[in-house]
Image (spheres, grey):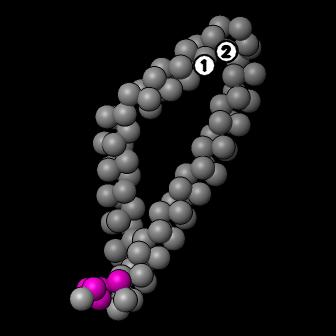
Amino acid sequence: METSFPLLEQIKSKLLAKKLSCLPSYQEARQDSQGLWRDFCAHQSSEARDQALDLLDSHGAVSSLERDAAFCLGLQLGLELGQLERFWETEG
C-alpha cells in the first residue's frame, strides 16, 4: 500500500491541474495575481522582490503540505468507510 500513495499523489496532481485549467474563476484569479505581481515588481527593489518571493515560496510549501495531508486523510477515510458493511446494504 505504501507504494500506492505516491502514485495516487501524482494522479491527484495531474487531475487537479486539469480541473484548474478548465475553471474560468481560477484563470481569472491567476491573471489577477500575475497583474498584481507585475505592479509590485515595477515599484519595488530587487531586495523587496526577493523577500516577497521567499515569503510566497514558504507559504506555497505550507499550503502544498496541507493539501497533500488533506488528500491522504480523505483517501484513508474513503478506504475505511468503504469497508463498512452498512454502506453496502440495500434497503428492502
Please state the horizontal and vertical placement of residue 78, each as a whole percent of the image.
41, 75
Note whether 10 is above or below 16 in the view shown.
Answer: below
Residue with the most extreme bottom position: 85
Which residue is label 1 attached to? 37
Whether residue 27 is situated above or below residue 80 in the rendered picture: above
Q: Amino acid at mark 2?
A: Phe
Would you say residue 15 sits in the magenta stretch?
no
Quadrant in which residue 92 is drawn: bottom left
Image point (60%, 19%), residue name: 37
Can see residue 2?
Answer: no
Q: Nearer the viewer, residue 15 or 56?
A: 15
Q: Main secondary structure of the magenta part?
A: loop
Please report contact status of discs 1 and 2: CB closer than 8 Å, yes or no. yes
Instruction: Identify which residue, 92 or 60, lies in the foreground.
Output: 92
Q: Position of residue 58 (x, y in %)?
A: 67, 44
Q: Secondary structure beneath disc 1?
A: helix
Amino acid type of disc 1? Trp
Residue numbers of the magenta segment: 87-91
Residue 89 within the segment the image draws in magenta: yes
Residue that label 2 marks? 40
Q: Residues within 10 Å of mark 2 (few under 14, many from 20)?
A: some
In the image, residue 65 sits, relative to residue 57, either above or below, namely: below
- Secondary structure beneath dot 2 equals helix
Tell whether 82 sits left or right of 72: left
